[in-house]
Amino acid sequence: MGKKCRFLRCNWTRNMIEESLELLRNRNSQWFVENHCDIPRRTLRYHSKSGSSERNLGCHKILTEDQEKDLEERIIRFANIEFPLTPVGLLMSRSVFEFVERYIKHPFNKVEKFAVREWFRGFMKRHPRISRTKAQPMNPARAVNLNPVIVKDYFTKLGAVIAQLDLKGRPKNIYNMGEKGIRLTVHHKQNVLALKGAKRAHLVSHEHAENVTAVACVSVMGA
């Protein structure tokens, strides 16, 4: 068994920290102050460098609450318009890193221009509305047609055809034919960020796989 730590988690007060800083300023060793005040040397070094006697527990948020709330809303909005962010995309320079690099002092990787994954894990815990989900690929052509104006125009024309052929009230004479492409190769769906509980998260992606097309034709009555 390893050596049991004799320090409880931050069981020291601000007065104790101020006393320990005063002892360090009087050229007492960190070992002596650690045993005299029951404060770990690592904590003593932190307060000695910062000059602050405020107690700080855990990891600190890089963004403010308002900034994180705005980021949460943007992530949900991107998912709703079929452009969901991936975890890697959120961490890369065009999202979080570029913003904090310009406006905020941060511990992110400046060489690779990447936000640290510890920040991402903390962000996900603080915002339970967002969850990881598997994206459903959508062909770009279909994504373009999934537009309220185009959909409304389609049903307007469909209504005109039904009226012209006198098919209203005669569902057994109305047929629809559709086709479905079935992938023959294994396809791994990509993890993306979306609103927790969302049934689907579409990600526009090109089809680069061999397919078999199944065609079905059925009337409105199901025959």
Image (tube, rainbow, N blue to C red):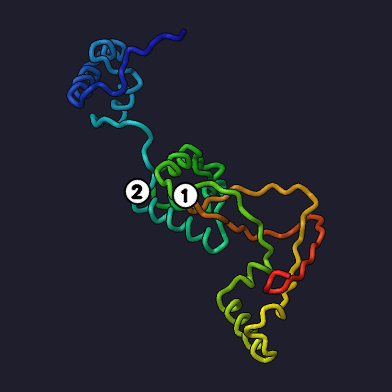
Residue at 47% x, 39% y: name it: 121
Badge 1 amino acid: Ile
Q: Residue at x 30, y 32 (%)?
A: 56
**Residue nearest the observer in this picture, 83 or 106:** 83
Q: Considering the numbered disc 2 on the image, is that residue within a helix, a strand or a loop?
A: loop
Front residue of 84 and 119 = 84
Residue extending farthest to the bottom is 164
Q: Which mark is residue 138?
A: none
Cα distance between the residues tagged 1 and 2 = 18 Å
- From this view, report whether residue 136 is shown above or below residue 43: below
What crowding class fits label 1: few (fewer than 14 Cα within 10 Å), some (14-19), or many (20 or more)?
Answer: many
Residue 80: give x, y in percent of width and height: 52, 61
> Is 213 displayed left or right of 104 in the figure?
right
- Dot 1 falls on a residue whose secondary structure is strand
Query: Three-letter amino acid code at disc 2?
Result: Thr
According to the picture, the residue beneath numbered tag 2 turns out to be 64
Q: Nearer the viewer, residue 168 or 148?
A: 168
Residue holding disc 1: 130
143 is higher (above) or lower (below) than 150: above
Where does residue 4 sit, x and y in percent of width and height?
Answer: 39, 10
Viewport quadrant of the C terminus: bottom right
Q: Is residue 13 above or below residue 77?
A: above
x, y percent for residue 195: 48, 53
How many C-alpha atoms fall within 10 Å of the one at disc 2: few (<14), some, or many (≥20)? few
Does 113 sit left or right of 188 as displayed? left
Of the residues under marks 1 and 2, which one precedes in the sequence?
2
- Please report the residue visible at 27 percent of the width from the left and 10 percent of the height from the top: 35
Seen in the image, is 5 located left or right of residue 158? left
